[in-house]
Image (cartoon, coloured by chain):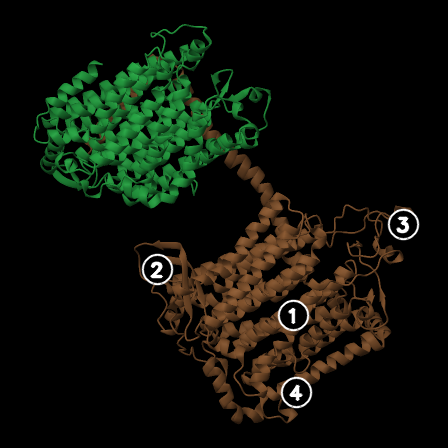
Chain colours: A green, B brown
Amino acid sequence: MTTLALSNSLIAASPTMTNMSSKITLIAPEILLFLGAVLVAVLGLSRNAALRRSVPMVTAIFLAGSIVVTCWVYRTDAVATSGLMLPMLGGYAKTLIAAIGILLVMLAGPSVDRRLEEAFDTGRASFDPIRVMRGEYFSFFLLSIAGTMLLANANDLIWMFLALELASLPTYVMVAVSRGTRRAQEAAVKYFFLGALSAATFLYGFAMLYGATGTLELPVMAERLATQSATTGISALAILGGVLAILGIGFKLAAVPMHFYAADVYEGASSPTTAFLGFVPKIAGVLALMILLSTFGYSGHSTVAGGSHIALPGLPAPLTAVLWMVAVLTMVLGNVAALLQSNVKRMLAYSSIAQSGYLIVGLIAGPQSGYDAVLFYLLGYGVTNTAMFAVLASLERHGEDVETLDDLAGLRTRHPVLAWMLAASAISLIGMPPFIGFFGKLALFSSAIEAGQTTLVIIAAVCSAISAFYYLQLVAVPMFGQPNARTETVQAVPSRWPRFAAVVCGVGVLVLPLGLAKLVAFASSSTEPSAKVAAAPSDTTASDAANLAAR
Amino acid sequence: MLDPASIQPAVVSIPAAIPSPEFAWAGLILLLPVLAAVLSTICGARGVKGKLPGAITSIALIASFVTTLMLFLRLPDDAPRTVHLFDWVAFAWSGTAPNTSFLAPFALYVDSLTLLWMLFVTGLGSLISIYATEYMEADVGKGYARFFASVAFFLFAMGALVMGGNLIVLYLGWEGVGLASYLLIGYFYTKPSAVAAAKKAFIMNRIGDLGLALGGFLIWTNYGTVEYDALFKAISSGAAPAANASAWGAWAIPYCLMLGAFGKSAQIPLFVWLPDAMEGPTPVSALIHAATMVTAGVYLIARMFPLFSLDPNALLVVACVGCLTAFVAATIGMAQYDIKRVMAYSTVSQLGYMFLGLGVGTTFGAVYHVFTHAFFKALLFLCCGAIMHGMAGQLDLRKLSGVRTVKGFGIISWTFFIGCLCLAGFPFTAGFFSKDTIIAQAFASGNPTFAWLGWVALFTAFLTAYYTFRVWFRVCAGPQKYEAGDEVHSHDDGAHDAHGHDDHGQAHGHAHGHAHGHAHGHAHSHAAAHAHSHDWHPHGPRWAINGVLLVICIGALLAAVPSYNGELQHKPNWVETMVAHSSAASGIPSHEHAAHGHEAGAAAHHALSFTGIEDVHTATSVVASAVGVLGICVALWFHLLNRTAADKLRAALLSNGLTRWLPLLLENKWYVDEIYHAVFRLPSWFLGHVLHFLDKQLIDGLLVNGGARVPVELGRLFQPLYNGALQGYAATMAGGIALIAAWVFWIWMHGG
């Protein structure tokens, strides 16, 4: 927990004291989640089984509370005085993260420590505070979400680095404790080492940026980069720093070439943890990239070629090239590799890689419509991703996760609701109307076309077509497959929460487009310059989440 | 003399529609059938055994009719009204005017044309659903709910088609009635011929629907709107079509719409589906395939008449196609033995008259004929249905005779007779007035082409009278003689139970082909040929069928009243007023008045001058009456007084090498099905097989599977990288970063 202490001290030491109070106001939701993390950690160690069992509920309540606080905070004028690059970014992002977080709690709640608690109940084992993991798991769960939320407020590179680490470090532990198998531990170790490599990469990049501009504060850095661009061109050091930072942060998105861990880690972790990994680090990476790319600015750059300035719109050309390359490789590799998988979790790992590719397309498109589209896409992706893993988390065979396609064959005959939800979310991920995934892709691709990235959109569309092949397996196998001896032993887990989450998300995939205009407006408010258009708290996502929390 | 070219695109101002939210209750006309359809479906799903679905549907449709009537009584007829029900399709974007939006709210456009149509659609719909509650009773608990759900859905779709305020709602209704028609033709889905007929109807209609869809699209590209009000405003203001419209696009609009109309209304070349559609239950034939749905094409052209009046050539095509269809279908109808088929061809033929009316420029005549035809043709079909119902599915006019004298068939026979009089155009019946309006206009227009069409129409009127009374004289008159059809069944009220007689040695198994859907649990022991031999008795209908027949018969007679007012008492013809106050009158009023104005001068020249009657309308009436009566007399001779003469004539024609083509051609329906089979189906079949082969081998084999193998192999190529070893992952990641960084530097160095 040294990280936490360090981050607090650095916040206090932030050079611009003028907007300190507004910054504190803006991170009120995160502060609430920190408190929650402490409380949950203590509760989880209680000898009282009822208290231990209340941990997921308390976690969900704190997440709901953070939604309420977020809605309140982003209506105050703290936003206007915060001096952030994208002051309104947090309003939507924090609400979204916390709302999806509540659904993820429903998945994880019953699964963590299930065997151990059963053993305690039946008296096969006596309570041992060393062995219970629930408190730690949900404590880390909240910390990781808090770190992701903090990214939305990042205003200097140190904050950004610490927030990224706060979002990532807990997930390594979560993978390790999610199920007590060696595979999970192996996955955690891989995840940790590769994560460290990526952290080193983007920290190196940050250092170069600091060296090239002489500041850590992003608004100041943006000014200096603009000055450089207008006079001598952006220095090679800054460009290299940017490239390394992008590639390093790409690890959070599982973007090529930092994607190697994804399949192994997704497979090794329990299904609820995989659902978490598929969403929270991804949105952290996207937020970090948005802020970083905004620092470089999309508003026109000039390069010096042959002694003369050539003005170019958008990001500096090398950065665009890197993002372009990464996006294409990520989409192609993710979709092609997913074709080969028979393990559903590995397939979804590659699918999540591919989805990151689409997100990068939106990032290339630029700050207004592109960012809006990316943020809106994340909503659809978050819901759909949760629905898929919720279906997996609802099933087990002899107490083990259900993982292969064969296990799902003929699911419809025995668990029709789960099969339908899986089908709905798979079709949504393909991007079929009228599901939410269609509108997400529509917004993303049209923003890229507006930005002139037609080739990229064509590649993305082809990749989408390829993706239909494996997503449709998730429809066809459960719906039309023949149940066999192996599937006979697949049964639903005793807890109804994962099923409930599956139904909520599966229905949400179909129902959310009904509130499309409001949701898009809410996502678009993120890139508004100030607090004027803070979305009403009665927005669908927020109220959905609040309703869920109330249950 | 007035030739079509001189009919200028008369700037007839169609009054701008008045938005009338206070009439939002008119939406009930559409909502009630939907409710009935939903409730009937629920009944079907819950397995209700009883007549509940029939009752629900009848009550809902009657309520819908009453609502229409209230709308008719309350609506001031000064201008069309638009009733915006809810936003439906709304797209807007930036672009070149006027194509900057695509708006199709779910709105109603109510003018007198709409009301006229909806009155007979909902009125006949209610009556026929009452009739069907009795007619379909053998299916209670099985298809009963399905039948009424489809009928109620049909009424909704027809309502949307007629009342919709834009082409998109019209298209919704258009496809909806097509779907309902498909479902109901294929109602006896265990019977292959019914399934084939349903598919044929559906596919033929698809061809027409393509035309309508293209027409709607072209209207949008040319005028920037699909809403009637805005469209009429654009046309009557004489505004040039949009800047980005193409000349051929504007030119093609009426022809595309025409294709749609010809498909739905069974005109050449898309008429062959309608006779086959008689596979559906008879109430369906009466409602959908005679009275309402098939007139949708006439409605479309009448509604879009402002567009058609811009192009006299388009109207000429409509007239020619209509006249040709009327003639061809009448000749086929002469030679059919199945009385429902005769009526089906007669429907095609009468629809031809309606298109002729539209083409020669009397929308009033066309609409009036739709109106009268709806009543008398529904009546005729319901009579055929009642006979079929009572005679165990017998429809062959050679096997029925003297039904008039069979107990319980009196009302059927005499209402049938009145229906036949109307269809034959017997003087002073409704059909007489409406048909003569059309034929007279063909002569009065002064266009020599139209005059020729008028002569053909007159000859067709003779054929019509002949084939109509051929049926009646054969079936209802003459000595009493009948054979049961192939679906002998008893009714609960039947005195005898013909079932369970396995002991009488004639257990021929089940020869009944479910032409009627009577899949009884009883053991049927009659085959068609022997059905008459034992306990079978024809049974007359009860109150629901008889009552409806009487009401529709009175309706068919009363349909002539507007003309009595118009012609004899010199009061304005009610239907004519209705049509004149709608968009269908665009381009017409000047024309009508001009024609009347010309009469004095043109009187001496009109085509029927030989009668010595100056007024062309009167002359037509006289000639048409004479022709009609002549047709009836011929039928009387051949089919009642001297029935062998007909057979002898046929044999004589067949034996003579020079004339044998005539009966063969007519009996084989001009070989149209065979021609279509040879010209369209066989090449399609062949092409389909070739394409299938190519698809399997080339596309699936080489491109798809081969193409799919590329990514798979690509994936395999990289799989060794994913060996799970941490060092490998880390090294590859670092290598990747280094490669990309180097590549970027290369770009940067080159100033890209």
Which label belongs to residue B622?
Answer: 4
Within the image, what quadrant is residue A69 found in?
top left
| Residue at mark 4 to residue at mark 2: CA–CA distance | 53 Å
Mark 3 / mark 4, whichever is N-terminal: 3
Say which chain tag 2 marks: B
Where is residue B21 drawn, in percent x and y? Answer: 39, 63
A465 sits to left or right of B123: left
Where is mark 3, residue-wise?
A: B506
| Residue at mark 2 to residue at mark 1: CA–CA distance | 47 Å
Say which chain tag 1 marks: B
Mark 2 / mark 1, whichever is N-terminal: 2
The reply to whether callout 3 and callout 4 are in contact (CB within 8 Å) is no
Say which chain tag 4 marks: B
| Residue at mark 3 to residue at mark 1: CA–CA distance | 41 Å
Where is mark 2, residue-wise?
A: B99
| Residue at mark 3 to residue at mark 4: CA–CA distance | 57 Å
Within the image, what quadrant is residue B544 found in?
bottom right
| Residue A156 seen by the camera | yes
**Disc nearest the viewer among 2 and 1:** 1
The answer to whether residue A138 is above or below residue A181 is below
Where is residue A466 drawn, in percent x and y? Answer: 44, 34
**Disc nearest the viewer among 3 and 4:** 3
Where is mark 1, residue-wise?
A: B552
Say which chain tag 3 marks: B
